[in-house]
Image (tube, grey):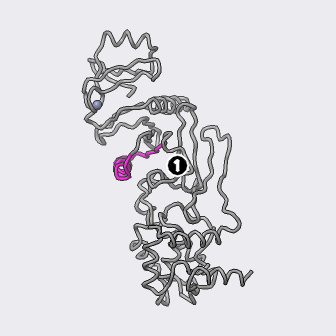
Amino acid sequence: MLIAKFEDGTLCYANQYTSAELQEIRRQHQFYCPSCAAKVTLRVGASKIAHFAHQNKCTSGNEGETSEHLAGKLFLFGYCQRQGWTCALEAFLPKLQQRPDILVTLPQVKIALEFQCSPISIKQLYKRTEMYRQNGYQVYWLLGRRYHDLRHWSAKKRAFLRYSKQAGFHLFLLEAVQKRLWLVHHVRQYGVPIKVSYQRQRFLDNSFVVTNHRPPANAVVIEAQTIYKQLYRGAPNVQGLQATCYLAGHHLAGAPWACHSTWPTPPVHRESAFNLRVRLLLFCEKKVELTDVQVTSFCRQHKPCFFELPLLTKTQRNYWQQQVVRLLLAEFSQFGFLKRTIFGWQICCLPIWYPDYFSKLKMLKRLE
Ligand SMILES: [Zn+2]
C-alpha cells in the first residue's frame, strides 16, 4: 500500500516524498496500517515504488502488492486528479471492510476503481461487487498483466465482463508501466471451439481501434468436421451432449446443418452456440409451441451451459441467457422451423437429422 498512518493517526503518503526524504521520515517514525492498525514497514528501494508492507498478513484481507499494482494505482490516482475529480487513494471504507484502490466521488455517484493484478475467485469477485453495489458504489475492475492475453478467454477473465448499450460486453485492461488503459469492447463469440471477437480502443485518448477475428468462409463445414473429430476422439465437451442426442434417437455428428452458423453471439455461454442449438432442437421436439415461459425454463435447466458473470445484475444475467436463446430461435425461424407468435414460437417443422457425419457431408455436396 501507498498510505500508512503515523503514530498520531495522520496519514503518510509514500508517493509524495523522494526516496531520501522517506528514508529520513523512516528514521523518525513508526507506521501503522489504516485498515487493521497493525505495524507496517516502509520499504524504499531502487527497483520498486516506495510502499508500506505488513510484517504479518493484514487482518483486513489486504494482500502483498506487486510493483505493477503500486504503479497502476499511482497512474489511476494521477489521472483522476488531472480530471479535477474528488478522489482518494486506498480509502478504507469501514462499513464495507474494503479499501478500493481509488475512490472517486462525483456529485451524483461514488465510484470505486479496483486494479486487479492477482487471481481472484469468481465467488470473491461476486461478493465484493455486490457489497459495493448494495452500498451505493459503482465499481470498475481494471485488469492487470495476468489478464492481458486476449487469445485466451477463461471463465475467470470473462467474469470481469460488464455490459453497456454503447460498448456491448466489455472489460478494461490497464498497462501500469506503459500507463495505458484499454477498453476491450463489443466482445462476442462464435464457433467450435469457441472463439472470441472484440474491438479494442485506447481509453482516455481514444487513439486507435483494432478489430480482430473473422470466421473463415467455410467455417460451417470446419465446425461440423471439428464436432465429428471430437466425437471420434471421445472429447468430454461433446460426450454429454451425444448421450442426450442418443436418447432422443439421434447422433450428434448428424445434427442438422442449421445447427451450424458463424453468426456471433453474446459472450455469455460456456457451451458453443452449436451445442445450444442442438439442445434447443431437442427441447422443441414433440412440442407444438414454445412459450416465453418455456424459454425461461430452458435457461434454468441449462444453467451450466452459461458463464457466471458476477459484474452483471441478476436481472441482466437472466436477460442475456434468454437473449442468446431468443437469438438462436430467431435464426431457426428464418429457416422456417418456427414462427413467432404473441406468446412465443409455434413449431412448424423441425429440420431433419442425418444418420451420421458422412450422410451430412453428402447432403451438402448435393446442394452445391
Ligand atoms: Zn492491515
Identified at 53% across, 75% down, the residue is: 277
Identified at 43% across, 35% down, the residue is: 102
Residue in the foreground of this view, choosing between 88 and 140: 140
- Decide: few, some or many residues near mark 1? Use Cα within 10 Å; few <14, some 14-19, many ≥20: many
Name the spot of residue 115 as percent of width and height, x first: 45, 39
Above/below status of 300 relative to 367: above
Q: Secondary structure at mark 1?
A: strand
Q: Which residues are magenta?
A: 120-142
In what quadrant of the picture does the N terminus appear?
Answer: top left
Quarter, ligand 1: top left
Kindly identify which residue carries mark 1.
171
Name the spot of residue 300 as percent of width and height, x first: 39, 72
Mark 1: amino acid: Leu
In what quadrant of the picture does the C terminus appear?
Answer: bottom right
Name the spot of residue 113 as percent of width and height, x first: 45, 40
Q: Is residue 359 left or right of residue 79?
A: right
Above/below status of 166 relative to 343: above
Place residue 196 in its image quadrant. Answer: bottom right
Indicate if the residue with disc 1 has its beta carbon within 8 Å of ligand 1.
no
Counting the numbered discs, the total is 1
